[in-house]
Structure formats: structure tokens, C-alpha cells
Amino acid sequence: MHNSKSEYIASAELAPANQPLLKDSAAEAILDVHDGFLAKDRVGKARIPFVKIGRAVRYRRADIEAFIAANMRKSTSDAGALSMLEDVK
């Protein structure tokens, strides 16, 4: 968690101008998960970075794709990071 607004701004990476930020519904469609998945993730572990603009929450497509890549498995017995749907119920 960031302690101050300046720390947050200093550590933020901006989305490229040609890649608009995604609303929850668009990001959830890319992930093929249920409505509310990302809201629950933000309250819990916030495994996918997000951008707050006032009360609006947006996602960078690159962060969604990185999350997918980090959760790729060849078998259900593969060790590694938590699966995409684990712990978000």
C-alpha cells in the first residue's frame, strides 16, 4: 500500500496513449469471469493493479494480460501462483 499520494503517483505507470483504460465490465469480459470478480479482488488481495480516477476504477490491458500470463498452467497439479479464481468467492 502506498503511504502518500506522491508515492502512489511516483510509482504509477501510465497507460500508453493508444491503449485506453478498461472499465470493470471490459476487463471481466477479457478474463471471462463473472460480474463483480474484479470488485471482490480489489477488496481482497488486489492481484491485478488498477487505477483510481476519482470514484472510477480502471484497468490497463497490459496488467490484465500479465495476470493471465502469470496464472498459466499446463496441468492442474502445477505449483506456483494462485489460480485466477481461487480465494475470490
Image (tube, rainbow, N blue to C red):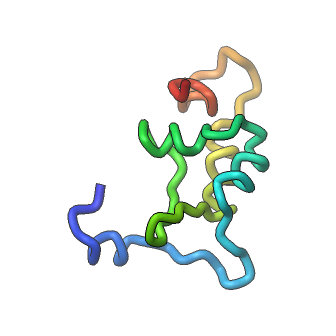
Rendering coords of residue 77 (x, y %):
66, 15
- Comparing 12 with 80, the one in front is 12
Count of numbered marks: 0
Q: Nearer the viewer, residue 33 or 15?
A: 33
Q: Is residue 44 left or right of residue 16?
A: left
**Place of residue 1 in the rendered image (x, y in percent of width and height, measured from the top left):** 30, 54
Extreme front residue here? 55
Instruction: Name, please, the residue furthest toward the bottom.
Output: 17
Q: Residue at x 42, y 41 (%)?
A: 43
Q: Quadrant of the C terminus?
A: top right
Residue 52: percent from the left, percent from the top? 46, 66
Name the residue at the left extreme.
3
* Above or below: residue 63 compared with residue 54: above
- Left or right side of 48 for 70: right
Q: Is residue 76 left or right of residue 83?
A: right
Q: Looking at the image, which is closer to me, 46 or 52? A: 52
Decide: is 84 above or below 77: below
Residue occupying the point 58% across, 44% down: 38
Q: Position of residue 54 (x, y in %)?
A: 44, 71
Question: Which residue is pictured at 51% across the width and 25% down the height?
Answer: 87
At x 42%, y 36%, the residue is 44
Q: Residue furthest top?
A: 77
